[in-house]
Each structure stands twice: as C-alpha cells, then as structure tokens.
Image (cartoon, coloured by chain):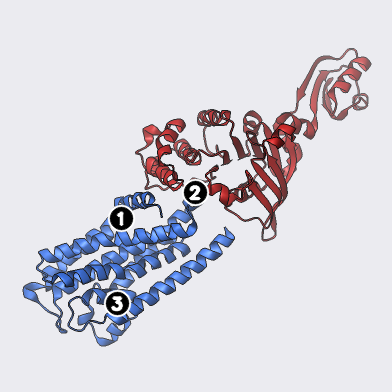
Amino acid sequence: MTTTATVQAGTAVSLTGLHKRYGDLRAVDGIDLTIAPGEVVALLGPNGAGKSTTVDMLLGLSRPDAGDVRIFGKTPREAVRAGVIGAMLQKDNLRANATVRETIEIVATLHGKPGRVAPTMATVGITDIAKQKCGKLSGGQKQRVRFALAMVSDPDLLVLDEPTVAMDVEIRRQFWRSMREYTDAGRTVLFATHYLEEAEEYADRVVLLRAGRVIADGTVAQVRSAASGRTLRAVVPDATEAQLAALPGVTSLELRDGRAVLSCADSDATVRALLHRHPEAHDIEIAAVNLEDAFLALTGEDAR
Amino acid sequence: MNFRYLAIEARLVLRNSRFTVFTVVMPSVLFLIYCGLWAKNGATYPDGSPVAASLMVAMAGYGSMGAALSTGAQIAMERGIGWQRQLRLTPMSGVTYMLTKGLLAMLMAFPTIALVSLLGVIQGVELGGGQWFRLIFGLWLAAAPFAVLGIMIGQYATVDSLQPIVSGLMMVLGLLGGMWIPAQIVPDWMQNIMKITPTYWLREVGQAAFAPHPVLGTAAAVLGGYAVLAGLLAARRYVTDTARV
C-alpha cells in the first residue's frame, strides 16, 4: 500500500507491535499499522475485535502493554497537547446540565482556541441548538455535538470510534457529508465501524481486525478480492456439478435446475472455459463479492 | 490553570438547583427559623457564647461544607459518563483538572457564608470588623478540607452512588458535627463523639471569632489532618486510575 509519495509526506499514524491484554483476553495482539496524511481509513471488525482498544491506545487514553504509537512523529500525549488529534468517543459522554455552547466552549478554551466555538458550531450545523441543554438533545443532535468537540481544535487527525452507532439513515448521511467537507481539506481520518457500507462508501482504505490482529488491509476492492474473488451466475442446461467444478478457478458452486452459482478465484478464466465447454450457457452475470461477504468470510462466526 | 474553564464550571454549578437549594437556600432558611426559636433578646449558651452568632456560624459552616463537598464530588459524574475522557484529549493535565475542581469547590463554598453572615447582620448579630473578617475568612479556609474530601469521594464513587454518598455524608457531618444540634447544649459523651468529626472543628473555627474560649490550634490541626488524609487517598486512587485507564 505504501507508495513513495506517502513515505515522503511522512506518516500521520504509526502503530508498531501494539499489544494490550485485559486479564486473559488479548484485546490487541500485535497490530502494526501506518497511515499516511490525507488517508481516510476504516478500522472494520466485529464487536470484540479490538477496535476500541486500538483507538484508546492511539489517543493515549490507554497505555499499550507493548509496542509504540506515534502521531505525526509525536507520542499521543504530545499530539494531544499540540491539538493535532480530535476524537469522537464512542459513548454519549455529554453533561446533561451543560448547554451545547458551554460544552464546546470548555473544550475549545482548554485547547486555547475559544475563537473556534462559533465557526465549529456553524460547520457542524448546531448553531440553532447552542443554548439547549445537552440532556434534552436527540441522539442525532448529541452525535453532532460530539463531532463538534472532535473538530473544535482544528485537528490534522480525526479519530472516530463508531461515530454513527444509533443514528438513523438520514442523519448518518448528513454526518458523512460534513465529514467529506472536512477530509476534502486533506486531513487524515481513522474511523472504527462495524457498518460495512460505511467502510465501503467512505474509506479509501479498509483495515480489517479480528481477535486483536489485522487480517486484511487494503483498498475496498483489494480486501474484497483477497477474501473470495467473484461470483459467476449462469444458466447452464444439462451440465453436471462435476463438470462445473472442473472449470478453472472455481472454488465452490451451487447448481439447481440448471442455474449455477460459481464462486471464482479467477472469474476471467472460468468464464472463458465455461463458454468453450458449455456453449449453451446463457444469462451470465459476474459480480464482485460485496464487502459484507468478504467480511463474513474473513471474520468467520464472530461477525454474527 | 484556565480561568475561563473555571468560570464556565462555576456557572454550571450555580445553575444546578439541587446545589442551590441544599447548600445555600436551606442553611439560610434554617438559620432564620432557629434564630426565631432560640435567639431572642441576645440569648447566650451556658458557655457564654451568643446564640444568634453561633447559629450563624453553624449554618454558614454547614452550607459551605456541603457546597465544597458536593462540588468536588462531581468528578465522579464526569468520570462515570466519560466526560473525563474527552477532557483528557485536551492539553489540560489530570493534576490541573483536580486543582481546578478544588478551586471551584472553594469558590462555591463562599456564597453561602456571605449570605448567612448577611442574614446574621439583619438578625442583629453584632461583631467587630476584625471578628467578621476572622469569622468569614476562617470559615471559608476551613471549607478546604471538605473540598479535598469531595474530590476524594469523586475518585471513588460511581454515578449512581454519588448522590446518596454526598447527601448521607452531609447529614451525618451536619448532625454529628453539632451544626444542627449545638454542641454547647449536648451531654459531654455526645460532645466527645462530635469532636471526631471535621465539621465540629469547622464550627470551632467560626466560633473562634467571638467565643470566650477559642480553640483555633486544635481545630486547624484536626482539619489539616483530614485534608491530608483525604488528599492522600485521592492521590492514591488517581495514580492507580491512570495506570489502569
């Protein structure tokens, strides 16, 4: 994945040999990850894969048992002090008694940037609810306030831990739209999610975690093909399962009433051979496996 | 220390009606009621101290104790809901956070002392300028151990246990400390129990401004002891907490 250009630009995030145990549980079991400035990376995995633990260590909220974290060459604490990291933490952590403005003011003022309160509220679209108490907000509004807290220091790296959990579809779309505006300015984003569509739609790169390890890392297309290639569907009258299984590149198949569904590692080779050996085959469809299938294939039972 | 942050926090505390009712309004109202009951015609206790002034010290002390304690203890809520994690993503250090909370607790302890003293003037408490200064400033300083105690509770309590612990402790310290039942009129054995509590000595600090036999030295020692003990417990928890995170 690493190109010369990204190496020259330095790294935004560098995790080396990261380990964290909780008792007998190896929450993070040797993670190495390098993120270049400007990348939008999804940390994808089922619950318990180690996403939140990784994010916590990245932010300096938790200390790794072994390994090293560098954010733009700094330790997490140094990076936090310099205001280069903004984070949207997982759970609703707003104080019910404080207004939206006060909440954002506190964080802005502690960053020494009180002037950022108004523009950040405007960007995130919460100016109209500035005087409301956080305890009275809807789930989507709270989410936007927390997003504003992440943005208020004008960070170079934005870390989002399951940002859209409990958002409805429309709010989720709005959220990602404002996210886009932010990333278009060339900033780096790492978001943890277990929504596959989000990773597929918004990330340049997907890092798949399972049981505390990285099991796949690449573009959405790469992760997909690494997982299980493509699916070829065709109507092939009179063909037997044995004949179809003998086609090159076929990894598994289903055949019912002449309708075949072939899982292929190399669909180009399969389709050539299919048409050659079974000229009567028709209604041929070749589709990339969606990320969900790839995800299930790679993470096994854990995903359910 | 970020004073703008301190100011926003102060606004949040003062807006909390539970805080105002229990630490400002209630002590003031109780003071007026008690004065009406017992402090007529310049009444004095058997030891010679004036009733009205003693009640004033007891209620101002009770209110400031409660204010300092409950403000410091809010740390438990901020930790429990995860707000502290957000603060840890700012340049403020954990120690500065604690110091700010301590200073906030001290600031919040002052209004009730001022208000009850003002009511005292209206009720006819007569003291010299130096006495007023020693009373008000002494009570305020003596609230510091309770700010530390509050921070300690804030380090150990959970969101759910916070309120019962703070209310319970305020009641026990108020009763046993001789703030609701004057120490001057209880039997000796009970007075001995009262002397274990920090609130008894908080009251002594205020009384020292006008009492015939002031005991400021012992009061300072006991209160200082409580402050150090609570501070050490809070620091210990803080260290293990950051190691764990």
Q: Position of residue A212 (x, y in %)?
A: 70, 49
A207 relative to B121 in the view: left or right: right
Q: CA distance from mark 3 to mark 2?
A: 39 Å
Kind of element beneath mark 3: helix
Indicate the chain on which mark 2 is placed: B
* Chain in red on the image: A
Q: Earlier in the sequence, mark 2 or mark 1?
A: 1
CA–CA distance between discs 3 and 1?
A: 26 Å
Same subunit, labels 3 and 2: the answer reads yes
Q: What residue is shown at x 60% (from left), y 36% (from top)?
A: A188
* Residue kind at label 3, given as amino acid type: Trp
**Residue A142 x, y percent position in the rendering:** 45, 39
The circle on residue A153 is: none
| Left-right relation of B157 to A227 | left
The reply to whether residue B62 is visible in this rendering is yes
Report how far apart the C-alphas of labels 2 and 1 lie in the structure.
29 Å
Question: What amino acid type should be assigned to the residue bearing mark 2?
Answer: Thr
Q: Is residue B216 left or right of residue A128?
A: left
* SS at mark 2 in the image: loop
Residue where numbered disc 1 is placed: B18
Chain coloured blue in the rendered structure = B
Q: Nearer the viewer, residue B7 or A176?
A: B7
Q: Answer with mark 3 or mark 1, whichever residue precedes in sequence.
A: 1
Residue drawn at x 30%, y 71% is B142
Residue A3 position by quadrant: top right
Instruction: Read off the residue under disc 3.
Output: B201
Which residue is at the front of the view, A261 or A139?
A139
